[in-house]
Image: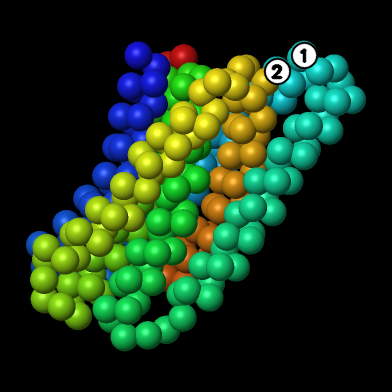
């Protein structure tokens, strides 16, 4: 049953990309779309950093220390965290080359490719988190979904205005979103035989490194480009409030 929950939440997180793509059916003022994007991204980065710092890393490190002892536990924890940072930095270099300025259609396609590369490891993160703890998986799903919505906008809008085809724009957002449950399925296929508390803890610390780096080096700079301090504050505040409420309810 835990597998079903994990796969379902990974699918929901990916589906949020398509939800973002639905913006092509509405007529918004550009400034309102920008405000929405900034709010969603700010909310997302607050949740991603908060979950990593207060939940993923401390709890997983404790399990590793208990299993392997202080010395090995610290070494393995730091190693997993650094692997997450290095991995996402390398991925971002690839994506930076893909995100060169181009015409609208090519921009949308390049956004789609870049976001598939991002969504695949996010699917693994959602799946493994939910497999260990359903409540943790739900919080992570919300965080990822919130920044997948504006990502869907980034794919659908340029493709739609280039082709005038809503079907094509939505299909491209779907391709990006489906990478998340695909990542979850592959994670289960290759890791199911080896799943243990120690392995899950290592993966979750690695995910913590990925999410903190992603939030600081990718999401936050995108938020800054819009120069909307009020919306940034509101998004971060809502993210922090959600974290506090989830802790109180637990």
Mark sitting on residue 63: 2
Say whether marks 1 and 2 touch (CB < 8 Å): yes
Image coordinates of residue 174 in percent, x first then y, are 25, 53
**Pointer 1: what residue?**
66
Q: How far apart are marks 1 and 2 (CA)?
A: 5 Å
Residue located 47% across and 54% down the image: 118
Tell me the residue at 11%/63% (across/down): 167
Q: Which residue is drawn at 65% across and 46% down?
A: 84
Which residue is at the far right?
A: 71
Does any portion of residue 242 appear in the rendered image? no
Front-lying residue, 1 or 43:
1
Label 2 crowd bin: few (<14), some (14–19), many (20+), radius 10 Å: some
Query: Does 221 sit above or below residue 199?
Result: below
Where residue 142 sits: x, y (%)?
37, 37
Question: Can residue 84 be seen at all in this image of the molecule?
Answer: yes
Query: Is 153 on the left or on the right of 78, as rendered?
Result: left
**Residue 207 has which mark?**
none
Up the image or down, 32 lies above or below 205; here it is: below
Q: Is mark 1 on a helix, strand or loop?
A: helix
Circle 1: is it few (<14), some (14-19), or many (20+) Cα within 10 Å? few
Q: Nearer the viewer, residue 202 or 154?
A: 202
């Amino acid at each position: 049953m835990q597998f079903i929950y994990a796969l379902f939440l990974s699918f929901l997180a990916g589906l949020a990309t398509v939800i973002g793509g639905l913006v092509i059916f509405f007529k918004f003022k550009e400034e309102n779309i920008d405000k929405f994007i900034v709010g969603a991204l700010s909310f997302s980065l607050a949740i991603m950093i908060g979950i990593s710092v207060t939940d993923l890393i401390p709890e997983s490190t404790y399990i590793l220390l208990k299993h392997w002892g202080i010395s090995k536990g610290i070494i393995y924890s730091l190693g997993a965290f650094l692997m997450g940072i290095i991995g996402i930095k390398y991925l971002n270099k690839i994506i930076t080359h893909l995100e060169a300025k181009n015409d609208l259609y090519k921009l949308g396609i390049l956004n789609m490719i870049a976001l598939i590369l991002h969504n695949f490891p996010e699917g693994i993160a959602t799946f493994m988190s939910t497999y260990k703890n359903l409540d943790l998986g739900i919080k992570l799903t919300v965080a990822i979904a919130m920044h997948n919505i504006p990502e869907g906008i980034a794919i659908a809008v340029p493709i739609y205005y280039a082709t005038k085809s809503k079907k094509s724009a939505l299909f491209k957002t779907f391709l990006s979103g489906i990478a998340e449950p695909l990542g979850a399925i592959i994670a289960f296929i290759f890791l199911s035989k080896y799943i243990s508390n120690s392995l899950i803890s290592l993966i979750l610390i690695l995910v913590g490194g990925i999410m903190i780096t992603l939030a600081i080096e990718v999401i936050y700079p995108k938020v800054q480009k819009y120069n909307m301090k009020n919306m940034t504050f509101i998004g971060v505040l809502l993210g922090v409030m959600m974290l506090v409420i989830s802790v109180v309810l637990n």
